Amino acid sequence: MPDNMVKAAFVERLNRFAMLADVNGRRVLCHVANSGRLRELLSPANTLWLSAAPLPTNPKATKRKTTHDLRLVDVEGVLVSADARLPNHLLREAIESGRLPEFAGFDQVRSEVTHGDSRLDLLLTGGSSTCLVEAKSVTLVNPVGDERGERVALFPDAPTSRGRKHVLNLCNAVKEGYRAAVVFVVQRPDADVLVPNVASDPDFYEALVEANVHGVEIYAYRCRVSLKEVAITDRIPVR
């Protein structure tokens, strides 16, 4: 996490990638690196943590209008990472450090690789095996436990045609002989299980079911989140 984070209060979401926040009585325009609805996060009841945007190397050439980036949200004492750009980096770090036994044996990791008509997050290679991986950022957790008393993480929180396209691309990759995996990175520590959010996007759910039938691996991991770091900790079930 950046060292220059400041507390803020949510004011208004302007569009998918911008919002207004209040920092000590001053309105600031903030970049939201997450296209989800984030209704459970972007609320006046929650404390936001923002970082100041880096100074441009060429001020005359920059088109950036936002002065801050949304990093974390404190939801009733639980810190949640809201940056959807992070999961592929978190996943890569966890794989390279050998902390995920599901991906043991891969000694080379490449980011942002093209397969078919999609750009996927990771390509893992090792020995004679190759695995394509797509990471999905999860921030929504049902505050009320299910009938088992488990706290349920849900994905997606808004329709995602792009996510569906990625999943179907992984189906094709398996047919071509690749190993493939969808990894849900829950960017908060309080989830016990991940469940596809059928009500939010039934088409994504159907694509995920098809992927599972064709041999695409499906995993979910939760994270520890602090003002200093976000890191994958352990695997949780996908139901």
Image (tube, rainbow, N blue to C red):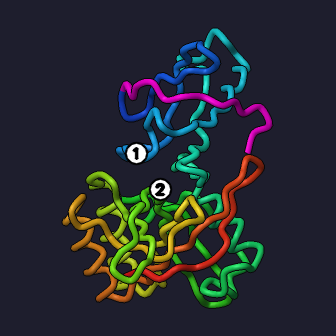
Residue 201 placement (x, y as % from top left): 23, 60
> Front-most of 103 and 82?
82
Segment colored magenta:
1-14
Residue tagged 2: 139
Q: Residue at x 66, y 26 (%)?
A: 53
> Front-most of 67 and 109?
67
**Cβ atoms under marks 2 and 1 closer than 8 Å:** yes
Q: Is residue 160 left or right of residue 182?
A: left
Q: Is residue 3 magenta?
A: yes
Q: Which quarter of the picture shows residue 189? A: bottom right
> Front-most of 54 and 61?
54
Residue 37 placement (x, y as % from top left): 35, 44
Task: Kindly report the distance in space between the C-alpha atoms of the residues bearing marks 2 and 1.
Answer: 8 Å
Residue type at mark 1 is Leu
Query: How dense is the environment of label 2, judged by Cα within 10 Å: few (below 14), some, or many (20 and up)?
Result: many
The answer to whether residue 85 is visible is no
Residue tagged 1: 38
Which of the image's four quarters has the N terminus?
Answer: top right
